[in-house]
Image: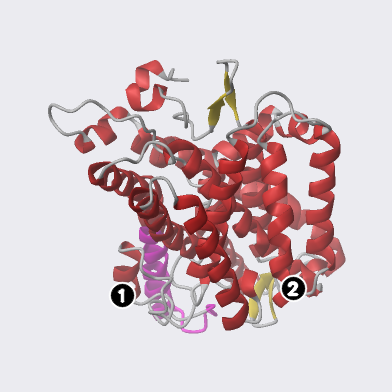
Amino acid sequence: MTSVSKLGPDFALMGVKPDGSVKMTQNSGHPHRFEALDALRGICALLIVFFHIPVHHVLKDVPTFANLQVCVDVFFVLSGFVLYHAYGQRLTSRTDGVRFMTRRFLRLWPLHVVMLGLLALLDLAKLAYGQSDTGFAMDAQPFSQGHSAWEIVTNLAFLQSFGLHPGMSWNGPAWSAAVEFYVSILFAALILAFPRHHLPVFLILGIAAALALHTLTPTPLSASTDWGVLRAVVGVFAGGLVCAMRRPASGPLRRASLLETGFLAVLVGCAVLLPVGGLQILLLPPICGLIYVLSFDDGVVSRVFRTRWLQSLGLWSYSVYMIHCFVFQVAKTAMTFIGRKTGLDLVVWHNQEKLVQIGTPEQALLPAIILSIALVVPLAAFTYRWIERPAMTPSAWRLLKRPGRATPNAAPVAPAALA
């Protein structure tokens, strides 16, 4: 793997490594990566994939299964944590702000636009085949609502999640990348506008957004293209505050294993037990607590999260999140085609969703878990290597440097959502 020094000065600075992982310098002077947070990001991305996999398994009928959507809120909080760690003390001028905004766009946009193009090509293929086989059943007509030409334009500008469309548009999961981009700009603008007092502003805006979210929608942590931007404001600013609390801490965390397992158990328990609705907002405190304690990398959960496979999953998390919708659409189209040609019932409509049928719903659970990993993770490793990583090379960032000015003390930040 290419060393940090070969990737240029931006990547050698304290903050974010070129592979997308986060590191922090302790008082001892030794660099320390937030390895547990890297893994947490990857696990949450994979859980979102499992939530969306179009297989008719038994959990599809469990109401609280929808609480897996809280993984997106974990992304938002992680994003705020990482952004504040990397830029909280480094944004000092308008030029820094413009450079930050450009870097965020280039970090989030390339993979997004590639997936948008692939989905458009898939619709073209469906359109062409549908004209020759009019009996071929599709989820929706190509280039219809949700896949229109106008929505390509709004997606290109990251504007698809601001009430311009009645629902998800093209690559559905990209809604969170879009709102995160604009919320991160607000995040940076507030640091520049209130260099000494931005933390109280973060707190006020976060609370206001949470109250608005709770008032405007009955399911605050399920909001997406309607009020998802408020959801991002809550998470990103909460993450910034968690990082600000973490900064003064030094040395190992006392009772780290107890705290890590405790916060993880509370979060999982709440996700399993809380009904989908207004009480979902109660999931945010354990998310923030878990991220705080995992940032020390000291406990038993952190040790598990530092395993090589989970670290790789964290590295590929943005790709895992962004490509899975396309992969699943291709898989459903292929299974529909095979079923039509063979006469087998390979797909079924369930709760207005076309799902692949693998035996009974109970029998399908394990295959659904395996397919979530097997179909998406290898392709995510590929898109990370050939789409995401090239955007983090010195040649990609060289255009952002002004002649005669040294490279600022900031490093490009990997999305937590991507996130």
Q: What residue would you read off at disc 1? A: 149
Q: CA distance from mark 1 to mark 2?
A: 38 Å
Q: Nearer the viewer, residue 392 or 281?
A: 281
Q: Which mark is residue 166?
A: none
Q: Is 130 within the magenta? A: yes
Whole-percent x and y of residue 367?
A: 77, 55
- From this view, report whether residue 130 is shown above or below residue 210: below
Q: Amino acid at mark 2?
A: Leu
Q: Residue furthest left?
A: 403
| Residue that appears at 22% across and 38% down | 400
**x and y percent of residue 65 in the render?**
76, 67
Q: Residue at x 63, y 53 (%)?
A: 74
Which portion, as a residue range, is magenta?
A: 116-139
The residue labelled by disc 2 is 279
**Residue 163 point in image, percent of width and height:** 42, 79
In this orientation, which residue lies closer to the viewer: 315 or 381?
315
Q: Is residue 272 visible?
A: yes
Residue type, numbered disc 1: Ala
- Quadrant in the picture for residue 157: bottom left
